[in-house]
Structure formats: C-alpha cells, structure tokens
Image: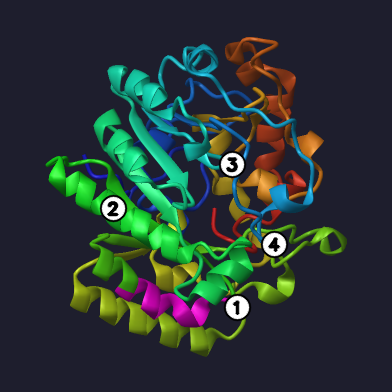
Amino acid sequence: MSEFIPLLASSSPPKGSLRLLPEQMFLPDAYRLPTGVAKGPLSPISPRVVFIEVTNRCNLLCETCPRTFFDREPLKTLSCAEFVQIAEQFPEMRRVLLHGIGEPLLNKELPQIIKYLKGREVEVIINSNGTLLTPTWQAALVESGLDQYRCSIDGAKSETYARIRGANALPKLVEGLAGLVKTKARLQAETPRISIWCVATKENLAELPDLVRLAARLGVPELYLQRLVYFAREPEQQFGLARDDRTIFGPDHDYQEEIITTCEALSAELGLDFRASGARDPRHSLEAARPADFSPWQECMRPWTTAYVTANGNCLPCCISPFATSNYSSLILGNLFERPFAEIWTDYLYQKFRSKLLSPQPHQACSSCGVYWSL
C-alpha cells in the first residue's frame, strides 16, 4: 500500500471536524480516525502509530537539537526485553518509528527489536544521522526487515554540515549511506526504503540543489524537506541555531521560490522524488506562516491516533513537542513503566491535552504548530 493515502478536498468532513488543511490531504491512513468519528477528550481507538525511543543517547551535538543544550531525561537505552514490554501495550500498532531524541544505531539490540516487530507485521521506520553506518550495520539493517531508513543530512558541504551537526562527519555519512544502497542491492532486498531528510534553515537553504544531486549520485530515490522546529513562543529560551533568525518559514519568499523551483527541476531531471515532511509538497511547506487566529493546530490528529514513548517510558503527545517548548515536564502525560498505557491513554491528562488542542488556547508547543511550522 502507498504510504500516502489521499483524502479528496471535495469529501464531506465528519460532523464535528474542522476544515481540511494541506497537511491532511496525503496523510498515511494509520494516522486517521475512522470515518465519521469526531475528535473529543477521549480517543475511540488504541494508537496505530507509535514512536518509541530505543535510546536517547546520541553521538552528535547538533546546534538545532534541545538535547545538546538541555537535560531532559536520564540517559537510557532500551533492551529488547524492555522494548517488548512497551510494544506489547499497543495491540493495534500498525506503524512504529524507532527514534526520538537519540541515535537508534547506538542500540546494539536494534536488529532484534526490528525482527520482533516484523513478526507482528508492523511497518518499521528509523530516522538516523547515518554516521554509524558501518558495513556490519548496513547488512544488519537490510537483513532485519526494516521498512524505511531515513537519513538526516543538513548540508551538502562538509563545513555547513559540521556547523549544524557539531561534527565534520559528512564524508563518513556519505560513505555509509552509499554502502547501505549497495548492500541492499547485493542482498537483492526490496527494503529498507532509503530517503534523505533535511531540516532547511538559512544555514543550508542554498545547498538544497546540491543535496538533490547528492541523493541522485548515491542512488537514494527520495529527498524530504523539513522546516526548523524551535521554541518559537519562548525567545529567551532559544538556543544554538534553533532561533527565529535562522528559520526560513515565510521570510525571503522569492529566494525560497527560486531554490524550490531549481530543486523541482533537478529532481525531475535526475529521477527522484522531492517532497516535504507533514505529507506536503516542498513549495507549500515553505509558505508564510498562518495567523494564530486560524487555529491550525485544531486539525492535528496525533493525540487521537499516535503515541510517543521515550526511552524512560514517559508518554508525550507527539514527536514534535520536545523540540517546541522548554517546559518539558508539561508534556509528560504518564509513564508506562509505572502504569499500563491503556490507563494513561484514557486518563485526565490526555483528556485535558486533547480538549485544549481543540480550543483557541492549546498547549504552548501546539500553538506554534501550523503557525511557525506544518502540522
């Protein structure tokens, strides 16, 4: 089945729902509520999409990541047994993403974890910085049955990558990613589907065409553009390169249009897909911010269909929220090492969070979503 399931704009929205946004047009089906079901304080389903941090350790100190600047949780890497303890609490899980704040390849039991999930017929995705892709890891990932390998590359030049990612690791990354493509071909495997993901900022926007060329040269068929998520509502807490003055959401519109047009033409010429996160196309992904009184966050589906579990067992509303506010404790809705997830999912904190998300005054992290970046 295709990852993106279109919902026609002419479709009649269920009673109680709000207007469709571009982000909703091509969401994977697992992120949706059943047809005709309206959102409320309770979700009528168990999460079908689950983010589970297999580790919160990382080998890089990225200038756009709160982990570099703030203590969030104790360092923790899940054993396979601990992972299974978490995963068994999600009986309806159809898609799992094994990343959050941390580098998944630092967990040596990752291949076992993936094989367990594939035994449950779950789609498995990881987002990785690619710097640990040794030949051993390349073979292990292909043989594990991993469905998608998403590699984060935030610059086509070594100096740009090093400035953003905190290490001069681009040559090593490129070598490892090329090796993964070759290993997949050597083993005659259809998976993992390999893609490159770039957080576009003023630091690297000019290099996007070269990143398209790099993807084509490596044989990577997809390149995704992401906007910078940062503490937009907390200027005094902004850190590193995650700042108002580094974002490209809205400013310099003509220059952005020129870059995107170049990338669209290049991707068509070179035969790869140029897309954006949030199930959007890159051109609309960089459009100017919506006004807050539009309340775009009200169309978010995540707290009704999706769960996020940290390596320490804390349940957060979504994968974006830790990057969007310094008030981390306000994001914790329960801990499933202490209580069953089924209780947490229906308890007061989740109900309160969902209700606020449907109001003009959502949680601070959510109030930036759709205003400063896409849902």
Secondary-structure class at tag 1: loop
> Which mark is drawn over residue 292?
4
On the image, numbered disc 3 is attached to which residue?
A: 102
On the image, numbered disc 2 is attached to which residue?
A: 179
For marks 4 and 2, the one nearer the N-term is 2
Residue sitting nearer the eye, 140 or 81: 140
Q: Position of residue 371 (x, y in %)?
A: 64, 62
Tell me: 53 left or right of 11: right
For marks 4 and 1, the one nearer the N-term is 1
Mark 1–mark 3 distance (CA, rounded to whole Å): 24 Å
Q: Amino acid at mark 3?
A: Gly
In the rendered structure, does residue 314 fall within the stretch colored magenta? Answer: no
Residue 195 at least partly seen? yes
For marks 3 and 4, the one nearer the N-term is 3
On the image, numbered disc 1 is attached to which residue?
A: 202
Tell me: 13 left or right of 344: left
Q: Amino acid at mark 2?
A: Gly
Q: Position of residue 54 (x, y in %)?
A: 53, 30
Tell me: 69 left or right of 263: right
Residue that appears at 69% across and 61% down: 293
Q: Residue furthest left?
A: 188
Q: Residues within 10 Å of mark 2 (few under 14, many from 20)?
A: some
Between circles 1 and 3, the one closer to the viewer is 3
Between circles 3 and 4, the one closer to the viewer is 3
Mark 3–mark 4 distance (CA, rounded to whole Å): 31 Å
Residue that appears at 73% across and 71% down: 244
- Which residue range is magenta in the image? 203-213
